[in-house]
Image: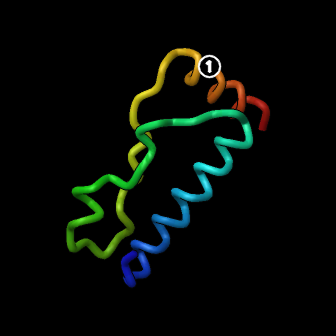
Amino acid sequence: MSDHVPDREAIEALTQLRAALAAHGITLPSLDLHLPSYAGSYRTPPLISLGNCNTATAQRLAAALADR
């Protein structure tokens, strides 16, 4: 794991997002750090890649967001 604050922030956000999605029974298999932005020497946190999902997952995600 990186010692850079932006990297740690991105990893924490990724972990929180995975947990929040899992609480709604949602798994995004491609959810991960965007490797080019993680490997780069930027001062901002790496991007988080949400990736692809099937229709059923997209519907569950939309329903979970609508419940807020």
Q: Residue sitting at 64 percent across and 42 percent down?
A: 21
Within 10 Å of the Cα at label 1, are there few (<14), some (14-19), or many (20+) other Cα atoms?
few
* Front-most of residues 51 and 67: 51
Query: Does 19 appear above or below 44?
Result: above
Query: Does 51 appear above or below 41?
Result: above
Residue 12 image offset from top left, x and y in percent: 54, 66
**Residue at the outermost right position:** 67
**Residue at the outermost top position:** 55
Quarter-of-image position of residue 3 = bottom left
Q: Residue sitting at 54 percent across and 61 percent down?
A: 13
* Front-most of residues 57 and 43: 57
Residue 35 image offset from top left, x and y in percent: 27, 56
What is the basis of the colouring in this image? Answer: rainbow
Q: Look at mark 1 in the image and give the residue it sits on.
A: 59
| Left or right relative to 60: residue 7 | left
Residue 58 image offset from top left, x and y in percent: 56, 23
> Which kind of residue does numbered mark 1 sit on?
Gln
Q: How many marks?
A: 1
Please, what secondary structure does the residue beneath circle 1 have?
Answer: helix
Q: Residue sitting at 26 percent across and 60 percent down?
A: 37
Quarter-of-image position of residue 40 = bottom left
Query: Does 28 appear above or below 10?
Result: above
Q: Residue sitting at 46 percent across and 37 percent down?
A: 29
Quadrant where the C terminus is found in the figure: top right
Quadrant where the N terminus is found in the figure: bottom left
Query: Does 7 appear above or below 46?
Result: below
Residue 36 image offset from top left, x and y in percent: 22, 57
